[in-house]
């Protein structure tokens, strides 16, 4: 989906990335969602609250509370 958008000259925004991240998280593919998150940052697209809470929830489901808390702190700072 993202590549199709880019092929048509449309740059993904926070809503696009957040939707993709949520879909990947629902499939319990946390590594892939983290890759999308890093790509989002490298493309200069600032994550919004929905992006952060989606990843925080995914880390909690995986039992990685340290990473969840780190992202929560990052979200609060921004």
Image (cartoon, helix red, strand yellow):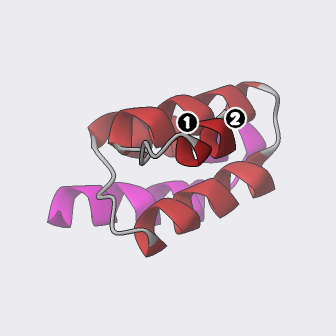
Q: Is residue 46 above or below residue 54?
A: below
Spatial distance from mark 2 to mark 1, Cα to Cα? Answer: 9 Å
The one nearer the camera, 30 or 59, is: 30
Q: Is residue 77 above or below residue 25?
A: below
Name the spot of residue 27 as percent of width and height, x first: 82, 28
Name the spot of residue 52 as percent of width and height, x first: 40, 46
Name the spot of residue 36 as percent of width and height, x first: 62, 55
Q: Which contiguous range is marked in magenta?
A: 57-78
Check disc 2 and report its element: helix, strand or loop: helix
User: Which numbered tag is attached to residue 57?
Assistant: 1
Q: Residue at x 20, y 57 (%)?
A: 76
Res 66 seen here: yes
The one nearer the camera, 77 or 3, is: 3
Name the spot of residue 53 as percent of width and height, x first: 42, 38
Lateral position of residue 45 relative to residue 26, left or right: left
Occupied quadrant, residue 26: top right
Lateral position of residue 37 relative to residue 11, left or right: right
| Dominant secondary structure of the residues highlighted in magenta in the image | helix
* Residue bearing mark 2: 25
Q: Residues within 10 Å of mark 1 (few under 14, many from 20)?
A: some
Image quarter of the C terminus? bottom left
Lateral position of residue 1 relative to residue 27, left or right: left
Q: Residues within 10 Å of mark 2 (few under 14, many from 20)?
A: many
Q: Is residue 53 above or below residue 33?
A: above
Tags 2 and 1 in contact by the CB under 8 Å rule? yes
Q: Residue at x 30, y 63 (%)?
A: 73
Residue 63 painted magenta:
yes
The one nearer the camera, 37 or 10, is: 10
Q: Residue at x 72, y 47 (%)?
A: 63
Check disc 1 and report its element: helix, strand or loop: helix
First in sequence, mark 2 or 1: give its number: 2
Can you name the residue that lies furthest to the front here? Answer: 8
């Amino acid at each position: 989906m993202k590549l199709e958008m880019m092929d048509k000259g449309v740059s993904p925004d926070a809503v696009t990335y957040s939707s993709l991240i949520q879909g990947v998280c629902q499939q319990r593919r946390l590594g892939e969602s983290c890759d999308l998150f890093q790509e989002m940052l490298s493309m200069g697209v600032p994550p919004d609250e929905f992006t952060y809470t989606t990843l925080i929830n995914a880390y909690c489901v995986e039992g990685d509370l340290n990473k969840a808390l780190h992202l929560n702190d990052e979200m609060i700072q921004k």
